[in-house]
Image (tube, rainbow, N blue to C red):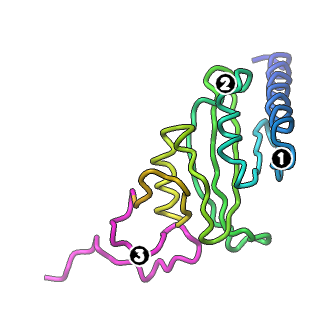
């Protein structure tokens, strides 16, 4: 790829990012808590109460068309300098039609529920269950919020920074003969 092609691609990506951010700012203004664009990746931190409405807008707007929820994950911010609120729920969106990505983040405290986006993207069902199972973040309105990776009787949430790894049951070890 030549330098001029690289510059053109970067310019087109910047225009696409500015369109996404422009539309989000028009629709949600104050709900956008933080916006970061770094190395052609856009991250938007939203207020919790605007998540579902923003996701529907991002999916349904023809110029944006974020029709694919590729991932939902969690971040335990326990030992970060600005650790409050404790958790981030991160949504990675992709527009198949426009070939662009967007990362949404919601920050919540311990025990605070995040609205489910299963009504926007059905695949959120499994992703949200995984975040619930491994981080303990509940999803309000989720149709089947239960463990998905850990056994039903497992205590705690193993991806939390304060999870006592040494105290975990050692079910995988064989008993001595």
Residue 128 spot, x, y in % from top left: 51, 52
From the top left corner, tell me how far across and down residue 68 is, in percent.
57, 32
Magenta-colored span: 148-177
Residue drawn at (50%, 61%) of the image: 132
| Most common SS among magenta residues | loop
- Residue hosting label 3: 155
Q: Is residue 162 magenta?
A: yes
- Horizontal relation, residue 54 to residue 151: left or right: right
| Pick the front one: 17 or 113 | 113
- Give the mark nearer the N terminus: 3 vs 2: 2
Q: Residue at x 65, y 64 (%)?
A: 87
In the image, 140 versus 99, the foreground residue is 140
Please determine whether, in this image, residue 101 is positioned above or below residue 83: above
Residue 154 highlighted magenta (yes or no): yes
Query: Badge 1 local density, few (<14 within 10 Å), some, or many (20+)?
Result: few
Classify residue 165 as left or right of residue 101: left
Kind of element beneath mark 2 = loop
**Which comes sooner in the sequence, label 1 or label 2?**
1
Q: Please, is residue 134 above or below residue 17 in the view?
A: below
Residue at 57%, 38% (x, y): give it. Answer: 120
Mark 1, secondary structure of its residue = strand
**Picture quadrant where residue 80 is located:** bottom right
Q: How many neighbours does mark 2 have within 10 angstroms: few (below 14), some (14-19), or many (20 or more)?
A: few
- Crowd band around label 3 with a 10 angstrom C-alpha radius: few (<14), some (14–19), many (20+): few
Q: Quadrant of the C terminus?
A: bottom left
**Callout 3: SS:** loop
Q: Which residue is mark 2?
A: 99
Q: Which residue is mark 1?
A: 35
Kindly report the distance in space between the C-alpha atoms of the residues bearing marks 3 and 2.
41 Å
Label 3 and label 1: CA atoms lie apart by 36 Å
The image shows residue 141, relative to residue 102, as above or below, that is: below
């Amino acid at each position: 790829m030549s330098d001029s092609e690289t510059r053109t691609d970067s310019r087109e990506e910047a225009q696409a990012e500015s369109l996404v951010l422009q539309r989000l700012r028009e629709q949600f203004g104050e709900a956008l808590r933080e916006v970061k664009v770094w190395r052609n990746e856009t991250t938007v931190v939203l207020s919790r109460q605007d998540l579902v409405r923003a996701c529907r807008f991002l999916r349904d707007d023809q110029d944006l068309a974020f029709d694919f929820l590729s991932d939902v994950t969690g971040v335990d911010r326990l030992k970060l300098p600005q650790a409050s609120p404790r958790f981030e729920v991160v949504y990675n969106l992709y527009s198949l039609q426009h070939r662009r990505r967007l990362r949404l983040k919601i920050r919540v405290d311990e025990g605070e529920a995040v609205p489910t986006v299963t009504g926007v993207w059905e695949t959120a069902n499994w992703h949200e269950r995984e975040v619930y199972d491994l981080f303990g973040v509940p999803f309000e309105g989720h149709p089947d919020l239960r463990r998905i990776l850990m056994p039903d009787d497992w205590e705690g949430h193993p991806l939390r920074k304060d999870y006592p790894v040494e105290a975990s049951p050692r079910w995988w070890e064989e008993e001595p003969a």
